[in-house]
Amino acid sequence: MKIFPENASSYGGEVDFIFWLITGVVAVASVIVIFLLLYPVLTRRRKLTKTQRYQKGEGFRNLRLIYLGILLLAIADFFFLYKEGPTWTKIEETLPDKEFHVAIIGRQWLWEIVYPGPDGKLYTADDVKKINQFYMPVNSVVHMDIQSYDVIHSVFIPNARFKQDALPGRNITRWVKMTKTGTFPLSCAEICGIGHANMKATIIVQNKEDFKKTLTKLYKK
Amino acid sequence: MEKIKKLTWREIPQARLAVWTLIAGEFVIFGGLIVMYILNRLKYESWGEMAQHTNVWAGTINTFVLLTSSYFVVKAHEAAVHKNKAQIKKWIWLTIVCAFMFLGIKSYEYTHEIMHGFTLPGKHLVAEGLGVESRYWSFYYTMTGLHGLHVIAGALALFFVMRNVTKTGKNYQRIEAAGLYWHMVDIIWIFLFPLIYLIH
Amino acid sequence: MNTHKKHGFWHRYFFSLDHKDIGFQYMLTIFLMVSIGGFFAYVFRMHLAFPDMKVPLFGLVTNKDYNMLITNHGLIMMMWLALGMLLAVAGNFLIPIMIGTDDMAFPKLNKISYWIFLLSVILMIASFFMPKGGLGVGWTLYPPLSVGDFGYNTPYKSFADRFFTANTFVLLAIAFEFTSLLMGGINFFVTTLNKRAKGMSLLKMPMVVWMINIANLLFMFSVGPLVAGTFMLLLDINVGTGFYDAYRGGDPLLWEHLFWFFGHPEVYVILLPPLGILAEIISVNSRKPLFGYKFILTLTLIAAVLSTMVWAHHQFVAGIDPRAATVFSIFTIIISLPFAGIILAYIATLWKGDLRFTLPMKWALGAVALFTLLGGFTGLHLGASVFDIYAHDTSFVVAHFHYTLFPTVIFGSFAAIYFWFSKFSGRKLNQTLGNLHFWLTFIFFNGFAFPLFLLGLAGQHRRIADYRQFEFLMQDPLPLYRKIATISAVILILSQFIFLFNFIWSLKRGKKETENNPWQANTLEWQTSSPPPHGNFKVYPVVNYGPYEYNRPDKDKDFTPQNEI
């Protein structure tokens, strides 16, 4: 059974890995907790003495096992943090050198994708705007300047395991590197009014030659 | 049915405990506003310029007025300890007069500022492209306005408590409780005054 | 709820100063609110599973309707149901009687708190009938959307046009509700400190009294900035200030911080009282002392402090500095530790216990199992900021918070009601109906919530009125999961009518409760009549024992009332 949509980005696998790591540990912990709950429920030990039952947990001795449980969880917790740290830094805090740069601007209720135009620079006179069609070259680092005209939107690319809120008055630059060609959905992941359900863009990842042709056609218009 | 004796925790009377808890809650509310103000002040230099348009003299007089009123409230508390109704009446009325003076001076300030276009929504400033600066005044009116509402609330509390205590001769501890609240109102002003009026 | 004097309807439901009557008033008001919130859930879930259907009792659901339904469902459940039931109702019923006193420290303040709460309910319901319709911006009320449909560019015509909006009324309702809860909080706190029975030191109080008070203090501490922020949002809407307007140097992110600085502690505020209720019920039904009383208290205080340091895990991808996000991720993951300890202490209470599978015990065990395994553990997934990049604003989050909130708030409330009903009403709830209610709720809650995990992992984002535009979300088995979730949710909601019927019927015609102490419990409320008289006790108890002295080796009975000589 497929759990996740197809992963088509360079760091998507790392995101999935964190999920499976935590799920694996949690599954083991769950088995333990289920046992701990079912055992008293199923055995209902009636024959114990009062002294055996009258355990208040005072003093370190009786609490030993609980401290052990907490310690094990703490170790697992720090292991999760240790494993996810580098991925977080990679996705959020670094910007590998760009091979393509667009601005994606949310507005109620569509996505404006701004291509840099023949001069290759964004925010110049020859920029070309497209609505809801986001062309990208495969295996290339794409920088996205994420912005909004009006309210808070969010750029969500499930197949890239990418998400970033788009705030009015701010420019947030993130990156993605798609590793497969094809079309992938881009949805808005922050409620933005009655058209929120309609805010869908399409990402079209093409190989480098097709992409060059697409850009040329785009810039001619 | 047995009657419950008035118990206390570590000898703190009920009313005092209640008001301290209330004060703690109020501090968090104003604390939030003050922190936001400070952060914005640090971020935008133009806010400092806007602050220059506040009336330092009015602010200073008001600070003096509130401090004096706190002294009066302390005297009222002393009178309550001695169960001296006449004195209670005198000192609380003086406190309420101070409240009126404070509000009067504040109204003068507000009128002056509004006439110069420094309003809560700041439409004039926004129209001139001074959006960031208009937010200074949003904060100014919100903080001083909320404080002013608490001055009114405190004065009303003092008035009703005074009337109740002097009429019934019971519940003298309420004078202290209302007085504590008044001190809180004063202290909040002590924080607002330098932030809004003095620091440039 | 008292038989001392036969009071008229108006007295009991409006003017009574008795904390038990006031608790009952809160409870009835909250039953009303939860019915509305539950109805909304029914409507929007039907729409999600059957998009073009005219939903029975509602009609066709437009995008605007959908946004309004989910927003108000969230607001009602989080603000009025959870906070109301677990602070106001639980605190009012339980605190004075469990500490062995007659009533709250300030009964008149208690009464006024209820009236303000009622006002907040009226304002909230009024918001549905505003000219522009009910609020549809998500329960989190993020500006600029919450300033008006088109943010700061919303064309308002006049002050009346701004004021008579759902935006304003909802914010006013919340403001009044917070005021009511703050007043109640002061009352509960002073009552607990000052009015305990002789001999009841703080460490001899039942855990639930501690938990409600810690929850209250946490609430009072964390709500302040949001009160300021709400005031600011109201000004933005009604006066045209620009606190959150990015084009005027304001910041929408500011609201997010103010909201979540309260919002995160809030979920612990509503978690702590149910944990307290579970402590009582598990201990009584295991005939064992609560394991690690001081241990649990210490961990609760640690968790309460930590809970004020994790708020931005709701904002990992919101545009905050990623380096700050790492700090919040660390604290979020760490907060799993004190709660793990508390749950393990509860399990240790069960261990070697002489278990009694009463209805309250079933609810309690169900709560512990579901909260820990599917709620708490998935919090680890979401606390890991990297996975949250994917999971944020998907159905995975919705499943997580339903698995943390429902077992604690709802199961906990039912556990409490089935436990204390006969004490406060003098009549017994029907056990057969109760068992039916429990099993249906347990099974169909899982049927509703579990598929949402799978939907979220498949990339289904939330607050979407119609998934049909998204091909990848229409592939099998996703529509099937949505249908399973919906049908389970509908059966879940219908099952609650069994409870409602049982509750109302038993109040009037239930078997009379003849015993003071049917559960053979230690705490003080069980040492007085069912229902208790006005003033709770004919003779005020003097406490000699802690609340969990079950199966003491030096006693004959397997329980030891706190006021035993």
Image: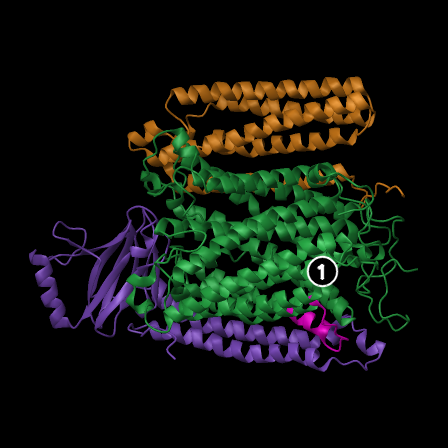
Chain colours: A purple, B orange, C green
Q: Position of residue C181 (x, y in %)?
A: 62, 44
Q: Position of residue C316 (x, y in %)?
A: 42, 59
Foreground of the two, C197 or C506: C506
Q: Position of residue C320 (x, y in %)?
A: 40, 55
Dot 1 amino acid type: Leu
> Magenta residues, as a range?
C342-359
Image quarter of the C terminus of chain C: bottom right
- Asked whether, in this view, residue C144 is left or right of residue C451, the answer is left
Q: Position of residue C167 (x, y in %)?
A: 44, 41
Q: Is residue C28 visible?
A: yes
Q: Is residue B29 visible?
A: no
Asked if the stretch drawn in magenta spans residue C352, the answer is: yes
Asked if the stretch drawn in magenta spans residue C345, the answer is: yes
- Asked whether, in this view, residue A171 is left or right of residue C219, the answer is left
- Look at 54% across and 60% down and name the residue there: C493
Q: What secondary structure is marked by label 1?
A: loop
Reading the image, the residue beneath label 1 is C429
Residue C453, quarter of picture: bottom left
- Look at 39% across and 61% down and name the residue there: C48
Residue C375, quarter of picture: bottom right
Foreground of the two, B102 or C472: C472
